[in-house]
Image (cartoon, coloured by chain):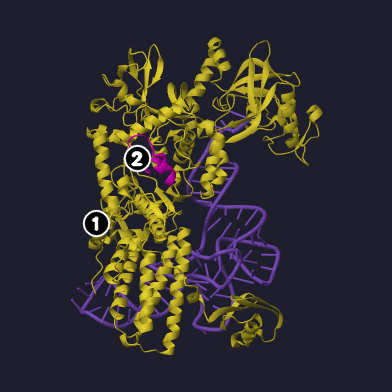
RNA sequence: GCGAAAGUGGCGAAACUGGUAUACGCGCUGGAUUUAGGUUCCAGUGCCGCAAGGUGUGCGGGUUCGACUCCCGCCUUUCGCACCA
């Protein structure tokens, strides 16, 4: 028997699949299509274990669907624009394009060594001039549609990356990539009107039934729809009015003051005349997005001296500039109800303002003098004139109606979602195709002039402060397409999330050179049936892509409403960490064994074994996939990752677990070879005893097919593999106890079936080895990758006898064998006759018997 | 603070709709094979106990003939959001 050699077997099959074009996808109306997509990688250098897990999961699903007869499309490409390339270019003094393409070449080879069933003919990188060109075309189409606009706005400025960030890219007041504290800056920026789709993006979330609940909730919260009333206060002695938005119109009679944002026009107006106000506003802006935001910031305010007039009572309400009011939400001004809003409560306490209770909870009397926090729950209206006695939910409607009737307010809806700012002041991105002309203003580049290409000679300008494109000596100089006068190109490039918002569409017709998309082919493959990727994209990429898709639908590029029917978010790969008190994180090879404890190999200090953390170079706990693939083969790496944990869960890396996967594959290899060696030319001799064991094995084969088939559609690859292991163990046990003489003809056929089923069921997970066993060992002339998933034989599942459990007072006391079709009465008789059970019944009275057919009998007794 | 998910052997994890808790793998113990190491094969392995038996799914209650599973109250961990009026 030849030994399993993953290196040669894997290279061989990868070559054959490539030669035979096994995984190229073509549109075929006669077969059901299945579009499987795994989030494409950023070409950062080399693949890491997270990639391996990600692509292994996707590939199992794709290969399983192929075996089920679907016409599967599984493409791969590169999310190639972005800042790391630019930073690497600065460090290495080479062009970002060179760095990117070199990484792509490395990573492509690495992915190919995993044996992934990709249609490599569809590969592209988003920095390819053609992809960039079609993206510019789509961008201009969205512009024509009114979904693109430019405005002067306060932006999130990342001082390290020297660029603007979208709201979604600011995490805890810090840049998502650089981690630097984000500053506020006013700039002219390009925006995509994602808010135009806010309602549809929200409304269709319930239709995404194949998405994880967590992602749906996150998107719902991100869009943040709320219902309320917008109305205006008149201002004492002024023609100005103060417009506010509230979700609590029921507390209108509890308003004792008003607060406005530091950026509010009225605040700015006051700052012109009042230096103290100006100083306060400046103070707010400096601390606005800094780290202090993380702490519970003190409620600071500045009394403007102005008075708003209560619309119903005419009472005077002081207006404050307050540091906690956001200009970007609602109208940038709020009515303050300290009794029923915690922020207003704290502010009122700090500034000695009146607290007026207007909602009375059931059973308790709120006293403003003794309250320690605002009451925000439900209750009955009080001190609210003709609304007294209403419950607050009813009051919300009545008061809203009254606002409308008196024409001082209207019912409105607010979203937390802001428009998507896509301007980036970096070189390595797709240029925004616009031209600034002194005479004509901002003019789109005519489609026939596209693409706007990045200049090649940029190296000396990278790394200088600001936008390299703006510093380029002549790139931005051009003629206005409208008047022909000298004009300037837009130097901003697009956020790289633009590229990932439609790459899945381009995969459907990557060779279309006359338009962004070949609509017929796009509509054939779309929507993506199964999308696989990390949860970290739950709002960013997945929300942008949904929006972009809907916008493209409205300009006629695609038909379907949602791009991704089902979404699988896989967990991270983690590993334990080693830390030295003086040298910090250590790789295992940077430690040594001494007196039973681990020591730092540099300073001999004892190593602290940390808990599992996401694999990262900085924590010195990464494992290079190439080492694993070279040493054990891709099949072992795949089996380990699929077996160690279900896909959604974090996976804990374990070297001994990899050994386990390797041993399992070798066990399969030896088992199949043994079966083949011992099942050729057998003499038919039948023994009844054997007959029964063989029937059991036949049942086991089909139970396994059943179990694995059900697990695969639920993506429970770990239990699917466990079921195959059980089958192989049963087969091995039989082979070990059966001498060659008694391996009768019937046994030969069942063992062969067992071996073949094992190989097919394992194929999606371990494609190379199973393909080799299928043709070379089992002698099939077909390709396993073109074969069919096995079908359960219902007859094989039928058993003559089953084991049922007998409990006494819920405790397991015996197991009895009964005929499958035995009646409840027969089972009970057999149970009572069991000597063990009788022992537990002596001296006791049977109260009742609970019988679950085919499962158990519980005898309830009393002593 | 709010929201969500999760807590099961020494470890990774199983358990269908309330019905044998710990499948499968790792590790460990013993044995066989091997010159040896490794490999492979066999047996064992939740805890207490010689055994019968008892006990056991984060903690405390409850429902039920029967609870990892359902209900109530806590604790812990992870993730997401965090002044959104």
Q: Quadrant of residue A64?
A: bottom left
Q: Secondary structure at mark 1?
A: helix
* Residue situated furthest front in the rendering: A30
B39 vs A215: above or below = below
Q: Position of residue A210 (x, y in %)?
A: 51, 50
Q: Position of residue A825 (x, y in %)?
A: 66, 82
Q: Does residue A579 show up magenta in the picture?
A: no
Instruction: Give the CA distance from mark 2 to mark 1.
Output: 26 Å
- The tag earlier along the polypeptide, 2 or 1, is 1
Q: Where does the magenta region start and end? A: A504-525
Read off the residue under disc 2: A79
Which shade is chain A?
A: yellow
Q: Nearer the viewer, residue A863 or A524?
A: A524
Q: Chain of mark 2?
A: A
Which shade is chain B?
A: purple
Determine if residue A158 is in view: no
Q: Position of residue B53 (x, y in %)?
A: 58, 80
């Amino acid at each position: 028997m030849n030994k399993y050699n993953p290196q040669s077997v894997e290279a061989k099959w990868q070559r054959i699949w490539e030669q035979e074009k096994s995984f190229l996808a073509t549109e075929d109306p006669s077969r059901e299509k299945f579009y499987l997509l795994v989030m494409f990688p950023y070409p950062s250098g080399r693949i890491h274990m997270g990639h391996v897990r990600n692509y292994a999961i996707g590939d199992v699903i794709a290969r399983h669907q192929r075996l089920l007869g679907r016409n599967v499309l599984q493409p791969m490409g590169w999310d190639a624009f972005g800042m790391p390339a630019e930073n690497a270019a600065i460090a290495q003094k080479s062009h970002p394009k060179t760095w990117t393409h070199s990484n792509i070449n490395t990573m492509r080879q690495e992915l190919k060594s995993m044996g992934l069933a990709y249609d490599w003919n569809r590969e592209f990188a988003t920095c390819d001039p053609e992809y960039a060109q079609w993206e510019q075309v789509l961008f201009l189409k969205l512009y024509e549609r009114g979904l693109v606009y430019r405005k002067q706005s306060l932006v999130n400025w990342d001082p390290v990356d020297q660029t603007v960030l979208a709201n979604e890219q600011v995490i805890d007041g810090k840049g998502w990539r650089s981690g630097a504290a984000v500053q506020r800056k006013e700039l002219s920026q390009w925006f995509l009107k994602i808010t135009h789709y806010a309602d549809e993006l929200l409304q269709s979330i319930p239709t995404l039934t194949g998405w994880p609940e967590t992602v749906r909730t996150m998107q719902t919260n991100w869009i943040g729809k709320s219902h309320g009333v917008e109305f205006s206060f008149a201002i004492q002695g002024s023609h100005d009015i103060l417009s506010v938005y509230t979700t609590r119109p029921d507390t209108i009679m509890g308003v004792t003051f008003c607060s406005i944002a530091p950026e509010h026009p009225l605040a700015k107006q006051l700052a012109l005349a009042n230096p103290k106000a100006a100083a306060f506003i400046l103070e707010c802006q400096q601390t606005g997005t800094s780290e202090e935001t993380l702490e519970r910031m003190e409620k600071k305010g500045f009394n403007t001296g102005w008075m708003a007039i209560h619309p119903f009572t005419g009472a005077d309400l002081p207006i404050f500039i307050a540091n906690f009011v956001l200009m970007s939400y609602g109208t940038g001004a709020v009515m303050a109800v300290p009794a029923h809003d915690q922020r207003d409560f704290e502010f009122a306490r700090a500034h000695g303002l009146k607290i007026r209770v207007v909602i009375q909870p059931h059973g308790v009397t709120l006293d403003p003098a003794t309250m320690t926090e605002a009451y925000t729950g439900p209750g009955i209206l009080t001190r609210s004139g003709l609304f007294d006695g209403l419950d607050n939910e009813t009051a919300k409607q009545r008061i809203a109606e009254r606002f409308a009737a008196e024409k001082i307010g209207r019912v409105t809806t607010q979203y937390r979602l802001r428009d998507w700012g896509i301007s980036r002041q970096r070189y390595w991105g797709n240029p925004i195709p616009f031209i600034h002309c002194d005479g004509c203003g901002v003019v789109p580049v005519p489609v026939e002039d596209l693409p706007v290409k990045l200049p090649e000679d940029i190296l000396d300008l990278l790394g200088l402060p600001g936008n390299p494109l703006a510093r380029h000596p002549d790139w931005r100089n051009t003629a206005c397409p409208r008047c022909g006068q000298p004009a300037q190109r837009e130097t901003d490039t697009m956020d790289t999330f633009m590229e990932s918002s439609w790459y899945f569409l381009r995969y459907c017709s990557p060779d279309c050179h006359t338009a962004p998309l070949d609509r017929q082919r796009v509509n054939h493959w779309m929507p993506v049936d199964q999308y696989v990727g990390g949860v970290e994209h739950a709002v960013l990429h997945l929300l942008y892509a949904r929006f972009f898709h809907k916008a493209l639908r409205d300009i006629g590029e695609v038909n379907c409403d949602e791009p991704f029917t089902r979404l699988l978010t896989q967990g991270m790969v983690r590993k334990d960490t080693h830390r030295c008190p003086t040298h910090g994180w250590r790789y295992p090879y940077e430690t040594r064994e001494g007196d039973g404890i681990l020591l730092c190999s540099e300073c001999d200090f004892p190593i602290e074994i940390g808990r599992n953390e996401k694999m990262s170079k900085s924590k010195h706990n990464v494992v290079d996939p190439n080492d694993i693939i070279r040493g054990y083969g891709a099949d072992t790496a795949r089996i380990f990752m699929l077996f160690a944990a279900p896909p959604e869960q974090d996976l804990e890396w374990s070297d001994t677990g990899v050994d386990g996967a390797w041993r399992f594959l070798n066990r399969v290899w030896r088992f199949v070879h043994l079966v083949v060696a011992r099942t050729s030319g057998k003499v038919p001799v039948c023994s009844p005893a054997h007959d029964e064991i063989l029937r059991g094995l036949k049942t086991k084969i089909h139970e396994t097919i059943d179990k694995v088939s059900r697990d695969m559609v639920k993506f429970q690859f770990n239990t699917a593999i466990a079921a195959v292991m059980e089958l192989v163990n049963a087969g091995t046990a039989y082979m070990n106890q059966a001498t060659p003489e008694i391996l009768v003809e019937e046994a030969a056929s069942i063992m062969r079936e067992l071996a073949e089923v094992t190989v097919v069921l394992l194929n999606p997970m371990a494609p190379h080895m199973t393909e080799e066993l299928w043709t070379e060992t089992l002698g099939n002339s077909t390709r396993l990758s073109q074969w069919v998933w096995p079908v359960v034989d219902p007859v094989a599942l039928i058993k003559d006898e089953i084991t049922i459990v007998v409990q006494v007072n819920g405790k397991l006391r015996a197991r009895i064998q009964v005929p499958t079709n035995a009646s409840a009465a027969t089972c009970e008789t057999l149970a009572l006759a069991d000597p063990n059970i009788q022992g537990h019944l002596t001296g006791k009275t049977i109260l009742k018997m609970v019988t679950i057919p085919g499962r158990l009998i519980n005898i309830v007794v009393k002593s």
